[in-house]
Amino acid sequence: NAGVTQTPKFQVLKTGQSMTLQCAQDMNHEYMSWYRQDPGMGLRLIHYSVGAGITDQGEVPNGYNVSRSTTEDFPLRLLSAAPSQTSVYFCASSYSDRGPMNTEAFFGQGTRLTVV
Amino acid sequence: KNQVEQSPQSLIILEGKNCTLQCNYTVSPFSNLRWYKQDTGRGPVSLTIMTFSENTKSNGRYTATLDADTKQSSLHITASQLSDSASYICVVSAKNSGYALNFGKGTSLLVTP
């Protein structure tokens, strides 16, 4: 199993450009999520999905779109990049966080995005 | 507001020494608490997960404790190694909050020879 795979690892965008960060998992996990990590701050939830066809907003969703057409893939789209979106983005997946299972979340390697 | 506070912010120790990292939280109602290790330039990797009924859990040289009454957790690292140099993140989730995880800012640990 590859786990959670994110692409690209690094990206530089100009202000106003759009792009898609890719995330794929091969563990058949129901739950997938996107976080951003900024210096001096904890990871913050952008969007999440509890299964194919179902997505919802997290703490900082503005400027980002997501979709979940398959269980495996959960891409994050930046509609019109802004310097404030310069950050490290992490995708995570888990089997379930509900009930007694409390399974762990697996994180991708991250995408370091710079918007100039 | 659900919050997770970690201390110290950073720590430097000599190889072979022990250390303890702290986590205080106000997340309610409590579901579980996790400790993650994040190496520079990598994603977080889970060390332990504890639910309300668990007050200690070990993973090799890492031992996490949980006091749900005082809402405190600690991560104890025994006989530190250079490879333990990383950021250690405390994460708490609440019941009935969907799938939201509340992340601390992390403790940056440097182990020196």
Image: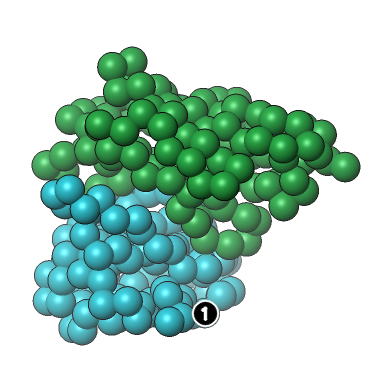
Res B30 visible: yes
Res B103 visible: no
Q: Nearer the viewer, residue B31 or B102?
A: B31
Give how far across and how far down residue B82 sits, in percent.
77, 48
Q: Is residue A49 left or right of residue A4?
A: left
Residue in view at x 22 percent, y 38 percent = B31
The residue that disc 1 covers is: A8
Local crowd size for mark 1, using a 10 Å CA cut-off: few (<14), some (14–19), many (≥20):
some
Quadrant position of the N terminus of chain B in the picture? top left
Q: Indicate the chain coloured green by its letter.
A: B
Residue in view at x 43 percent, y 38 percent = B57
Q: Is residue A62 left or right of residue A114?
A: left
Q: Indicate whether B48 appears above or below B10.
A: below
Give how far across and how far down residue B13 sits, in percent.
77, 32
Residue in view at x 88 percent, y 42 percent = B113
Q: Nearer the viewer, residue A116 or A37?
A: A37
Q: Nearer the viewer, residue A23 or B112?
A: B112
Q: Indicate whether A67 appears above or below B29.
A: below
Count of numbered labels shown in the rendering? 1
Q: Chain of mark 1?
A: A
Work out which residue is located at the far top of the displayed protein and give it. B70
Amino acid under disc 1: Pro
Q: Indicate the chain coloured cyan by its letter.
A: A
Q: Nearer the viewer, residue A15 or B58?
A: B58
Residue in view at x 70 percent, y 46 percent = B85
